Image (tube, rainbow, N blue to C red):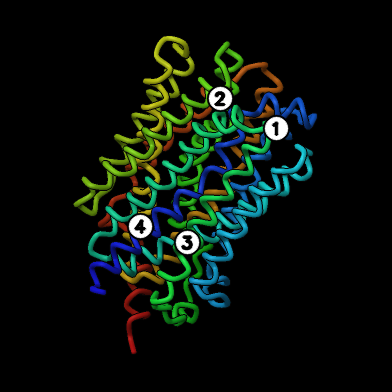
Amino acid sequence: MSQKQKQSLMLLVLVLTGLNMRPLLTSVGPLLPQLRLASGMSFTVAALLTALPVIAMGVLALAGGWIDRHIRERNSVALSLLMIAIGALLRETAPHSGILLCSALLGGIGIGIVQAIMPTVIKRLFHQRMPQVMGLWSAALMGGGGLGAAITPWLTQHSSVWYHALAWWALPALIALIGWWPQSKTLAQPAHAAASVPLRVHITPRAWTLGLYFGLINGGYASLIAWLPPYYIQLGASAQASGTLLALMTVGQTAGALLLPIFARRQDRRRLLFFALALQLAGFCGFIMLPLSQPVLWALLCGVGLGGAFPLCLVLALDHSPHPAIAGRLVAFMQGIGFIVAGLSPFLSGVLRSLSGDFLLDWALHALCVVGLMLLTLRFIPARYPHEWRTLSTTFQKP
């Protein structure tokens, strides 16, 4: 088999794996009224079904260095896909709040491990096409989220018991596992010399800035997948219609993740990031001021903006070092802090919903965060990237 064919197969496996990174989160929103009624969850506790996996993603991203040193990439991804499948299968049982929270946490751990590993794999295997492949990986994530939102209500209608629909999401995880295991056999395991490099990411201001930046962007996504369907159900929409709206938002995310990185041919990513954030701001303002007028438009605007910003954030962090291992450690830290921040967002949204009786206050908060992110974007000037990252990369490459 030629090298080009191997890379094509690996791209297919990456897409299959990426499709499993979001259905565990997005499949819950359209069924939240039934789920709360059956389990007795409050809005605040129900928010943990989204918050726990996202926080787990952050914690596992911070532990990415330890995982890389002790577990091979091949085994890590395989184990993670198995955990995602088990997390979905746990939802086959009666909707007890404890079991649901355990399934969310288990699946979140699996998702977090995969997301910590894949950026490094992509930079190493597809260095010349890194922004485009990162966009494809991100599009698969977003597309999987859309499938979770759109297909779950349909599965509910064709299941003997409504909550059995949630367990069906174990099937694509098992399919991805079957694809990953033989294909990853030829995946070269990187040397672990990066562990000896004294790169103390946690004391670097730029790393914390990137983590906050990534977290606030994904906080908007986490709140939308948790509360956009309940918001429109409260406004009178059906579960299927609200789930379809969330699916359309993720269609926009997929398009944004695929299209915006194509234009990232220059190292300065600020213009594209600013554009993505402007789309998000327009979408959140639409949800606040004209929610019933053009809901599909607002969902698509938010989706394209969120989808485009996600891979651009990853590429922005990877740009700081030419060496995959060094850049991967920065990306892992950024995702770790970012997902912990993002995981708090749906929980805060649930608290605000309980206090105010609607979601308008939450959408306004996210709109203000987007304005702050637009100002922060201006600081990401490539010529001013911290010198220490390049110095460490040079040290890493010395014999």
Mark 3–mark 1 Cα distance, whole angstroms, equals 51 Å
Q: Earlier in the sequence, mark 1 or mark 4?
A: 4
Amino acid on which the number 2 mark rests in the picture: Pro
Query: Dot 1 lies on which element?
Result: loop
Asked if disc 1 and disc 2 are in contact, CB closer than 8 Å, the reply is: no
**Can see residue 353?**
yes
Q: Is residue 274 above or below residue 140?
A: above
Residue 92 in picture, x, y percent from top left? 70, 43
Residue count near mark 2 (Cα–Cα under 10 Å), binned few <14, some 14–19, many ≥20: many
Query: Dot 3 lies on which element?
Result: loop
Residue 284 placement: quadrant = top left
Residue 191 in picture, x, y percent from top left? 43, 82
**Quadrant holding the N terminus:** bottom left
Mark 1–mark 4 Cα distance, whole angstroms, equals 34 Å
Mark 1–mark 2 Cα distance, whole angstroms, equals 21 Å
Query: Dot 2 lies on which element?
Result: helix
Query: Dot 4 lies on which element?
Result: helix
Mark 2–mark 3 Cα distance, whole angstroms, equals 39 Å
Give the mark toward the camera: 2 or 3.
2
Mark 3–mark 4 Cα distance, whole angstroms, equals 36 Å
Looking at the rendered structure, which numbered label has been put on residue 229? 2
Amino acid on which the number 3 mark rests in the picture: Thr
Residue position marked by numbered label 3 in the rendering: 204
Q: Residue at left 28%, top 51%?
A: 381
Residue 121 placement: quadrant = bottom left
Mark 2–mark 4 Cα distance, whole angstroms, equals 31 Å
Residue position marked by numbered label 1 in the rendering: 161
**Can see residue 360?**
no
Q: Is residue 261 above or below residue 334?
A: above
Q: Residue at left 62%, top 52%?
A: 107
Residue position marked by numbered label 4 in the rendering: 12
Residue 306 in picture, x, y percent from top left? 40, 37
